[in-house]
Image (cartoon, rainbow, N blue to C red):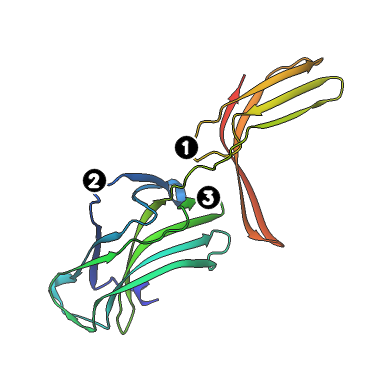
Amino acid sequence: MTSLFFSTPVDIDVVLEGSDDRQTVDVKLDKGRRERVPLYMDGESVKGAVTVRPKDGKRLEHTGINVQFIGTIEMYYDRGSHYEFLSLVQELAAPGELQHPQNFPFNFKNVEKQYESYNGINVKLRYFVRVTVSRRMADVVREKDLWVYSYRMPPETNSPIKMDVGIEDCLHIEFEYSKSKYHLKDVIVGRIYFLLVRLKIKHMELSIIRRETTGSPPNQYNESETLVRFER
């Protein structure tokens, strides 16, 4: 609680190597805010440097400085519920004192990132670098987020989908999709056949809906979000 009332005695900067040339992803934050974060791949090393800078040239006593690479699943409806599926740590400095800015390199080599980053309605899967300057009073913590893509080989079989709906003796519509599995940037190609029409049709609408399921019964939450809508 001390850190809520007193300014921190140290500034911490985290710079990821190659960040100026690295591809970024536009991520939606809370309250309509957005942020661009660097993009990493599964198996790629996460390295960079941490600069710890005591304020006003004052001497800073600490009980150790470390850097972590963390992957968590965070539930929005339960702020205290965090599942930490990845946690790597490196010591940057043993207990001691700092009076001048000091730079600490770090390197988490060939990190397996088994899940892709995700920012949904009720849940967020997040990767970040956390630097902690431990002190006898309140620790000073700085976090820097990154985004993860995990590419996989396409499935060997990807059969088309056919389905039909309608009203008996009045309307019969058949849908056909070119395949059953898609990646997140894929193009959905298909056809709609009106096999029987004995009703007046005012308009037709196609929607792509993302359905998100979090938790497990009986505490399971389902949310749907319309990503795009076509009307003919």
- Quadrant in the rendering for residue 132: bottom left
Label 2 residue SS: loop
Q: Label 1 crowding class (10 Å Cα cut-off): few <14, some 14-19, many 20+?
A: few
The residue closer to the viewer here, 205 or 54, is 205
In the displayed structure image, the side of residue 36 where residue 187 appears, left or right: right
CA gap between label 3 and label 1 equals: 17 Å
Do tag 3 and tag 1 residues touch (Cβ < 8 Å)?
no
Label 3 residue SS: loop
The disc, 2 or 1, on the residue closer to the chain's N-terminal end is 2
* Amino acid at circle 3: Gly
In the displayed structure image, the side of residue 133 where residue 220 appears, left or right: right
Residue 13 is situated, as x and y percent measured from the top left of the image, at 24, 62
Residue 217 is situated, as x and y percent measured from the top left of the image, at 70, 61
Image quarter (top left, top right, bottom left or bottom right) of the C terminus: top right
Image quarter (top left, top right, bottom left or bottom right) of the N terminus: bottom left
CA gap between label 2 and label 1 equals: 23 Å
Looking at the rendered structure, which numbered label has been put on residue 21? Answer: 2
Q: What residue is rendered at 67% in x and 22% in y?
A: 192
Q: Which residue is mark 3?
A: 120
* Amino acid at circle 1: Lys
Q: Nearer the viewer, mark 3 or mark 1?
A: 1
Looking at the rendered structure, which numbered label has been put on residue 185? Answer: 1
Q: Label 2 crowding class (10 Å Cα cut-off): few <14, some 14-19, many 20+?
A: few
The disc, 3 or 1, on the residue closer to the chain's N-terminal end is 3
Q: What residue is rendered at 47% in x and 45% in y?
A: 153
The disc, 2 or 3, on the residue closer to the chain's N-terminal end is 2
